[in-house]
Amino acid sequence: MADDSKLSDESKKPIESAEGPGLLDQEALSQLFDSWGSLSTHAKREKFASLQRTDAEEFFLSLKVDDQADLIAEASSLEKRSWVRMLAPDDVADLIQELGPDHKDKILKLLDPQTCREVTALLAYAEDNAGGLMNSRFVRLRPDMSVDEAISYLRIQAKTQVEIIYYAYVIDSDQTLMGVTSFRELFSSAPHKKIREIMKTDLVKVPVNLDQEHIAKIFSQHDLMALPVVDEWGHIKGIVTFDDIASVLQEEATEDIQKLGAVEALDAPYMKTPFFELLKKRATWLILLFIGEMFTASAMGYFQHEIQRAVVLALFIPLIISSGGNSGSQASTLIIRAMALGEVRLRDWLRVLMREIAAGVCLGLVLGLIGLCRILLWPTRDQLYGEHYLLIALTVGISVIGVVLWGTIAGSMLPFVLKKLRIDPATASAPFVATLVDVTGLIIYFTVAALTLSGTML
């Protein structure tokens, strides 16, 4: 609490730099941005209110949409109008989605008619599709323009709020996308040449309903700054830029990591997620995993007779089930990440299975040999494991091979099964795989024990 009060006191100090009170140099502005996430909501508003207009504009545009929403939510009507009109249409759409449907009409009324129409059109698309990510302001050219005319026209368009000016998209009279040209191509071409002569027609484009994860993959495969978004008739509707998708990549990676840890994906940053919602998202998976682990007790109850006759078998239960769970978690993590990067596809399941069987056998042999040596070379093996310590060692060694192999197969194949069922493969979290392998690992262990120790200890 002392740190929080100190932070709050610091937030009340006026922001100054060498340039004078209220003015921030770039270093001070960068420091404020770096410390922004650790400030309370009240401290953020005070810091922001103390900035001069020029600094405030630069800082506001650099913030994430959730921070922008926090500042705008408490602003006066005039301030809201001022800040909202600074944003590009796609950023306004993101802001409305962050604030919620109750603020939609209020925000739209603050916009000029043209921007209002653009934002309304963007809100018609799902926020995680190309249509929801795109910006409707981009550089347009006609195919019959000369290069000289195009450059003059681009100068005019550059003064408006276009998203980027690296590419100019060539469209016909009904907005059908015909091709694309870059500034480099325009300036290096003869002034009298027509745009249709220099444009590229084999351009990469994405449909309006394409999921953001697929768009991110396309960006990673092609060295582009922007992608045009088209409808089913080939009409260009807007562009998705790399900076738009960069935040998407972070969101997708965060969601996958949370799922791999057996947590439902959080809808907001950790510190902004309500406590009881956080409990709910964590408790759901923990309850399911706890119920799954109950089958472990059922499996041990089924082999209760064997345990009573050879109590020494119980000593190695944690070793056996943890080996299978760890190998399964490894395999599932590798395959899920490979799927996310596009390195592995659904049709590759058989190749993956063959590789993982080989890997499972090799890893099982290594761990089984270590377990075998642990028993055979232990100084007090006779007292600990009895006269049949050699059979105990064989039981543990063979069981580890079987459990590690099964864990590897289960961990690697489960993401394929989920993907086939159109379920996010990241749901095959490490704890989930470990729980699954724990139960089956006990069955493998006691089955091997029954075969190996039959006629001696059992």
Image (tube, rainbow, N blue to C red):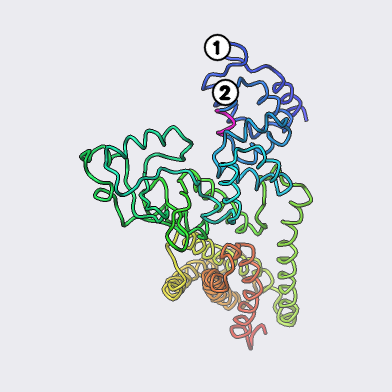
Residue occupying image coordinates x 60% and y 46%: 93
> Which element carries disc 1, helix, strand or loop?
loop
Q: How many residues crowd around disc 2 within 10 Å: few (fewer than 14), some, or many (20 or more)? A: some
Q: Quadrant of the C terminus?
A: bottom right
| Position of residue 268 measured from the top left corner of the image (x, y, whole percent) | 67, 47
Say the numbered circle drawn on residue 18.
Answer: 1
Q: Which mark is residue 55?
A: 2
For residue 270, side relative to residue 418 (left or right): right
Q: Between 6 and 293, which is closer to the camera in this rendering?
A: 6
SS for dot 2: helix
The residue type indicated by label 1 comes to Ala
Label the magenta part by its dominant secondary structure: helix
Going by the numbered disc 2, the residue's amino acid type is: Asp
Which residues make up the magenta segment?
Answer: 58-62
Determine the CA span between mark 2 and mark 1: 14 Å
Where residue 431 appears, as percent x and y from the top left, is 64, 62
Q: Position of residue 220 (x, y in %)?
A: 41, 52
